[in-house]
Image (cartoon, helix red, strand yellow):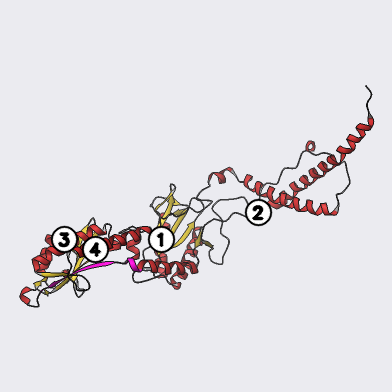
Amino acid sequence: MEINWDYVLVALAMLLPFALYGGWLLLNRLRRRGQLASLAAGKDEPSFASQAAPVAASQEPEIEAVAQVPDQLPAAAPPSESDVEPDISTDQPPAGEQQEDARASAAQVAADTAVADDASQPPAAQQESGPQDKFPALSANDLPEHFYYVARLSCPAPGFAAAQMREMSADIVKQARLQKHQLLLGWDGGKWQSLRSEMKYRCVVWCIPLCTRTTCIENEEIAAVTRCIRTWMQRTGGQAQLPVVKDVKESLQQVHEFCEPVDAIFAVRLVAMAEDNAKVHSCAQILEIAYAHGLENVEGRIERRLNSETLYSMRAANGDELGSKSPDRKLASIVLELDVPRVTRPRESCEEMFEFAGKLARVLGYRMLDEKGQQIEKQDEQECLLWIEDVVLALREQGIKPGGRLARALFS
C-alpha cells in the first residue's frame, strides 16, 4: 500500500497551529503557578461577619478574626519535569491577542487564588465553622433586636468566661451611668442562652433596651458604652461589633411610636358616695377586706401577687401607698391599677381586679368609676377586656411577651 505524503503533510500543517497554541497555554499555566505562590504570601485574614459595623479597640487596631488562618499560605509545588512539554515554538501571538490573553490570565489567577485560599485552610479551621466564622443570627424569639442597643462580641477559643462578661456589664453600667436593664446572652449548643457561670463563650451579645417609660438612650451613654466595650475587648483579645449611632436613633424613634399606644395602665377608682365621714372608711378597714381577698403588703405597696408577679395593686387616690398610711386615716377614694404590658395574663388579671373592685365597692358602699369619673357598668367591663386583648395582640406582633423580660424593661 503506497502512502500519499501529500495528505500527510496537509494533515500535519492543519494540526501544527493547535499544537503551538496548546504549548503556549501550558506555559501560561506554569507562569500562573508562580504568580499564585507570590500572591499567597500577602493574603489577608477574613473578617468576622455581622450585620453591625465592627468597632475595633482603642487606636483602631485590626483585631484578629475568630477563625485562625496562617500568616502565609504554602507555596504551590513546582511542576515535575514530566509535566512540562518542551517549547517547540518561538512565535508570539499578535498584540491584540496578547492583551485579551493577559486579561483572561489575570481573571484566571484571581479565580485560582480564591480556590487555593479555600483549599489551604487547615482541617481544624474547617471543623470550627459556624459561630466562629459568622456571628449567629438573633431571631425574634431570642431577642426582638429593634428594641435594643446590641453589642456583638466575639473571641477566639477558648472564648469569654461568663464571670468576665458579667464584670464587663457591671463596669459598663458604672461608666455609662445606665439605669436600664442589661441583658447578656451567650451562643451555646446552637442557641442563645443566659450565661452560665461554668461556661466560656465564643460569641456573646450585650444589650440594653433603647428606652423605658422615663428614659431613653442618649449620645453620651452610647459613647461611654463604646469606650468601655473597646477597653474590655482589648483586655480580653476579643472584638466588638457595635450599631451605628444613626441607626440607633432611627430605631429609638420607631420604638417610641410603637410604645405610646400600648403603654396601658388601666385604673378603677372607688369613691365614697357621700362626704359624710360616717360613710368614709378607714385605711385599716379597707386593708382588712383587701387582705381577706388575697392582697398583701409588699414594702408598703398593697398588691395582688401570683408566683412573684404583681397582677394589680391598690393605692390611695392621691398616690400614697396604703401600707404606709395611718390605720385610722379616712379614705374617701382609692384606686386599683393594672399595668397591662407587665402582666403575663392581662385579661385574666383584669377580670379578677373587676371582681374584687365590685366586692369592695359593695362592702364599703363606694361607687366604681373609670378614669373619666364615669360609673363602670357590666358592659363597660367587657369593652375594657376587648381593649386589653387588642393591646396584648399588638405587643405579641412585635415579639413582646406580656410580662416578659422586654416588656418589664420597656415599661418600667
Q: Quadrant where the N terminus lies?
A: top right
**Contact flag, marks 1 and 3 (Cβ < 8 Å):** no
Q: Nearer the viewer, residue 42 or 198?
A: 42
Q: Residues within 10 Å of mark 4 (few under 14, many from 20)?
A: few
Which badge, 4 or 2, is on the more N-terminal residue?
Answer: 2
User: Hey, what amino acid is under mark 1?
Assistant: Glu
Residue 355 badge: 3
User: Label 1, on which residue?
Assistant: 167
The picture quadrant where one finds residue 180 is bottom left
Examine the rendered structure and indicate whether residue 330 appears above or below residue 294: below
Q: Secondary structure at mark 1?
A: helix
Q: Residue at x 83, y 43 (%)?
A: 21
**Contact flag, marks 4 and 1 (Cβ < 8 Å):** no
Mark 4 or mark 1, whichever is nearer to me: 4
Which badge, 4 or 1, is on the more N-terminal residue?
Answer: 1
Between the C-alphas of marks 4 and 1, the distance is 48 Å
Between the C-alphas of marks 1 and 2, the distance is 37 Å
| Residue 392 x, y percent position in the rendering | 31, 60
Q: Secondary structure at mark 3?
A: helix
Which badge, 1 or 2, is on the more N-terminal residue?
Answer: 2
Magenta residues span 260-273
Q: Residue at x 42, y 58 (%)?
A: 165
| Residue 3 x, y percent position in the rendering | 93, 26
User: Label 2, on which residue?
Assistant: 43
Which badge, 1 or 3, is on the more N-terminal residue?
Answer: 1
User: Hey, what amino acid is under mark 4?
Assistant: Glu
271 in magenta: yes
User: Label 4, on which residue?
Assistant: 383
| Residue 164 x, y percent position in the rendering | 43, 57
